[in-house]
């Protein structure tokens, strides 16, 4: 292949990649806005509501992320089938993905409804537990549509139809925020339901997004040809096992990653209220920003999976390099903004002119510097993980995740934060070390898999 052909292939790949990455990243950012708005509204309802609702929201997010991750095997498997032109297999995987959503959601709904018994043993106040339980008892009814939406989103994305996902999520998020306000504070003649109102609005929004995407699949000229909702009563254990084999490790990966940051947050709380507040400011900021590389990662999984179906190793490599390049450019810009405008970023959350906030600001600024350095690595490891998912390699990365985050990261953070007296800075340096280790391990794994496939297909 000459230079001109290679250049044209890369240009084409960038175009196809952006068609997926932009709507998927936009959808992730839009969804994260709901949590941001919820936090603001909870704060206006009082400290007790913020404590109980905030705790419940974190718990629910962890459960939903883990459960939704378990059905994400739909994306690489359908992408591979799409690349190979296997229409019947696409139909079967999509249908079993819906069944898997139901299978994993039901037990997690039951668990979510009985978490008050566990919270009693965590030292939370009776009021916090009561409010958290009120929120979770309602939110559990949104778990299936959230997981089902993830499965359908994985399907349409794998078929290179990501734009409607962005539109549906943006509309759903706007609906959620508006009705949070109406039901939470009792506007326009509706009763003031407080925290329960926020939960009901979220459940309605989740069902609305799930049903809207299902309707889109039924009506779209190309997607309806796959007849996803026909013969839905037929369960195919073999395909379910395939989906679980790829998807369950992704769910566990997500749960372990979320759990790692929750542990760091609990440790930060032992350093004092100011340290915890500074941590929350920086962490909330990177959570929103991280939605972009996460969306890029979803696109990477699809493109690599499609090239895998075509048995094109060069295509797999090109999709990976395009993903890494776009992620690097975006995260480098974020890092520069963190370094140049730390007070402006903190000012989104606090009045930086108020002397009462001086301690929090002084603690948050070095955390932003550490975060700036880690952002590029974090985006890098997520892009590489997207490629690994596209190659349907999820079990080994899950093990590497445990080693990097829970082994190296927590140990380094604890030692630096508590034994070497670096406090909150030490805990964040530990996080950054974990991210770096995972990025290196994932890269090594990806290079090994590509080398193996080149040996199996030397002519590709």
Image (spheres, rainbow, N blue to C red):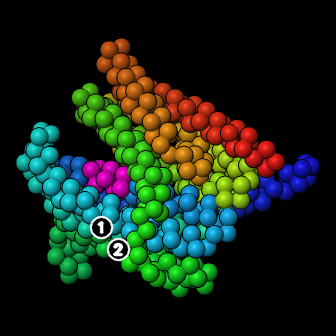
The magenta stretch is 57-67
Q: Residue furthest top?
A: 420
x and y percentages locating residue 173 in the rendered image: 41, 68
- Looking at the image, can residue 71 be seen? yes
- Looking at the image, can residue 365 be seen? no
x and y percentages locating residue 250 in the rendered image: 45, 49
Label 1's element?
helix
Cα distance between the residues tagged 1 and 2: 7 Å
Is 168 in front, or is 370? 168
* Image point (46%, 30%), residue name: 404
Residue at image mark 1 = 142
Residue at image mark 2 = 207
Is 338 in front, or is 62? 62
Label 2's element?
helix
Q: Are marks 1 and 2 in contact (CB under 8 Å)?
A: yes
x and y percentages locating residue 356 in the rendered image: 28, 35
* Image point (17%, 69%), residue name: 193
């Amino acid at each position: 292949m000459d230079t001109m052909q290679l250049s044209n292939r890369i240009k084409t790949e960038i175009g196809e990649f952006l068609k997926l990455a932009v709507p998927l990243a936009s959808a992730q950012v839009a969804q994260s806005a709901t949590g941001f708005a919820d936090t603001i509204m909870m704060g206006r309802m009082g400290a007790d509501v913020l404590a109980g609702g905030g705790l419940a929201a974190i718990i629910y997010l962890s459960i939903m992320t883990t459960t939704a991750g378990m059905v994400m095997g739909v994306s690489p498997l359908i992408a591979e089938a799409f690349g190979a032109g296997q229409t019947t297999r696409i139909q079967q995987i999509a249908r079993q993905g819906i069944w898997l959503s139901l299978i994993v959601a039901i037990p997690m709904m039951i668990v979510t409804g009985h978490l008050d018994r566990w919270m009693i043993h965590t030292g939370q106040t009776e009021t916090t537990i009561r409010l958290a339980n009120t929120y979770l008892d309602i939110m559990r009814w949104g778990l299936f549509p959230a997981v089902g939406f993830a499965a359908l989103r994985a399907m349409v994305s794998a078929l290179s139809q990501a734009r409607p996902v962005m539109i549906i999520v943006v509309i759903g998020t706007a609906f959620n925020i508006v009705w949070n306000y109406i039901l939470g504070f009792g506007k326009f003649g509706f009763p003031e339901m407080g925290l329960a109102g926020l939960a009901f609005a979220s459940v309605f929004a989740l069902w609305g997004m799930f049903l809207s995407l299902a309707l889109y699949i039924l009506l779209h000229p190309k997607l309806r040809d796959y007849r996803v909702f026909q013969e839905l009563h037929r369960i195919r254990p073999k395909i379910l096992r395939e989906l679980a084999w790829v998807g369950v490790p992704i769910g566990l990966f997500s749960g372990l990653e979320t759990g790692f940051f929750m542990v760091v947050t609990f440790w930060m709380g032992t350093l004092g209220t100011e340290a915890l507040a500074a941590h929350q400011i920086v962490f909330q900021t990177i959570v929103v920003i991280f939605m972009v590389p996460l969306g890029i990662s979803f696109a990477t999984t699809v493109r690599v999976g499609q090239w895998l179906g075509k048995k094109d190793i060069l295509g797999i490599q090109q999709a990976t390099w395009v993903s890494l390049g776009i992620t690097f450019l975006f995260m480098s810009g974020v890092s520069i903004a963190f370094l140049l405008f730390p007070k402006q970023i903190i000012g989104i959350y606090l009045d930086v002119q108020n002397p009462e906030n001086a301690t929090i600001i002084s603690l948050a600024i070095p955390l932003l510097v550490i975060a700036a350095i880690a952002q590029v690595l974090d985006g890098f490891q997520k892009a590489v993980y997207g490629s690994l998912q596209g190659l349907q390699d999820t079990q080994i990365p899950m093990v590497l995740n445990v080693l990097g985050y829970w082994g190296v990261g927590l140990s380094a953070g604890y030692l630096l934060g508590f034994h070497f007296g670096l406090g909150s800075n030490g805990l964040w340096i530990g996080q950054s070390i974990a991210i770096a280790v995972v990025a290196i391990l994932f890269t090594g794994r990806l290079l090994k898999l590509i080398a193996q496939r080149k040996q199996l297909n030397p002519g590709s």
